[in-house]
Image: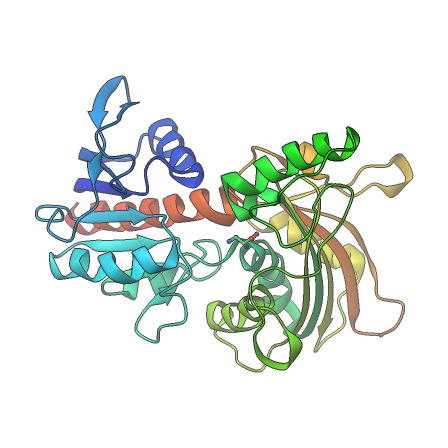
Amino acid sequence: MFQTVALVGATGAVGRIMRQLLEERDFPAREFRFLASARSAGTTLTFKGKQYTVEELRKDVFAGVDLVISTTPDDTARDFLPAAVEAGATVIDESGYWRMNESVALVIPEVNPQAALDAQGIIASPNCSTTQMVMALKPLHDAARVRRVVVSTYQATSGAGVQGNADLTDGTRAHLEGQPYDYQAFSHPIAFNCIPQIGREKEEGYTSEEMKMVYETRKILGDDSILVSPTCVRIPVANCHSESIIVETEQPVSPEDARRLFEEFPGITVVDDLANGAYPLPSTCDGSDEVFIGRIRRDLSHPNGLNFWCVSDNLRKGAATNAVQIAELLAKHRSAATA
Ligand code: 2RA
């Protein structure tokens, strides 16, 4: 059990879901504190029936805090989280800033829980598009060793924050009314469109979002030999990222075996009945903490290839849920150690 848990970024979209999860799942702690930028500091929120005033995030606020769960922009994580570690807190960070730092564990509790238990200081939660894919890869990797992955993402506007969803709604309305609209979160209209760029340009013509899928996958699975070829696309869907995933394994895996491996893996739900039109959709996966898989089939172009469709709530398992699950894992380990 933790004594004092501080939620940093408590008033943002992911922070709001984290509060809900900590409350619903009755996270074990004596005291909670809620922190945010100066803009939201001073506002009040209700947690477990009690009113809290949101405190301003400053470097000197972490005394006495033993667990920080943080969801902020990268530069905020860079500037403030080392102060929390110095004050003695374990930090779970949902931003992108610390993920690939060698001394930081990058954790999906169902995939590499030991990395969280061995970690000192900051534990990072992966990028949303990586998390759902690695959840699907893990049982295949354990059974037949994943060699190569070709992934195309269909990412929701909520991944670009509150403004992303405002752009979807307001931009669509303007488009239908024939009015101009000034997009804030996207460099092209998202209404009735798809945009094959998420993040900034990185090496060899890939974007930062795509390279996260390459590097984070290898780090989480602890295997630098895994080849990942990603294309990340923003589509006009409000929430839940979808991915077409083609996997080549060292040993062949039949669709039937893959279905069984997915069904047995914690956190995965299989919805796969093409004849009856049953497969995961953003509209049916919204609000769930699971990773959904369907359209499981042989890759017609490769004897050791498997092809499937994967959908998950990017704000939940892709962000808030994964971070809270890491916290729960640490809390459970602490209780076991002190029992
Ligand atoms: C996106 N993956 O969807 C990002 C958010 N972390 O834009």
Marker count (numbered):
0
Tell me if residue 97 can be seen: yes
Where is residue 112? Give x, y as percent: 44, 62
Where is residue 83? Give x, y as percent: 16, 59
Seen at 39% across and 38% down, the residue is 12
Q: Which sits in the foreground, 156 or 162?
A: 162
With 269 as the anchor, is 89 left or right in this view? left
Seen at 79% across and 70% down, the residue is 305
Q: Quadrant of the C terminus?
A: top left
With 114 as the anchor, is 195 left or right in this view? right
Where is residue 38? Give x, y as percent: 24, 40
Seen at 60% across and 67% down, the residue is 210
Work out whether 137 lies above or below 188. Answer: below
Q: Which sits in the foreground, 170 or 252?
A: 170
Quadrant assignment, res 253: bottom right
Seen at 66% across and 71% down, the residue is 144
Q: Which sits in the foreground, 113 or 4?
A: 4
Quadrant assignment, res 75: bottom left
Q: Quadrant of the N terminus?
A: top left
Q: Which sits in the foreground, 244 or 336?
A: 244
With 82 as the anchor, is 215 left or right in this view? right
Where is residue 159? Give x, y as percent: 55, 47
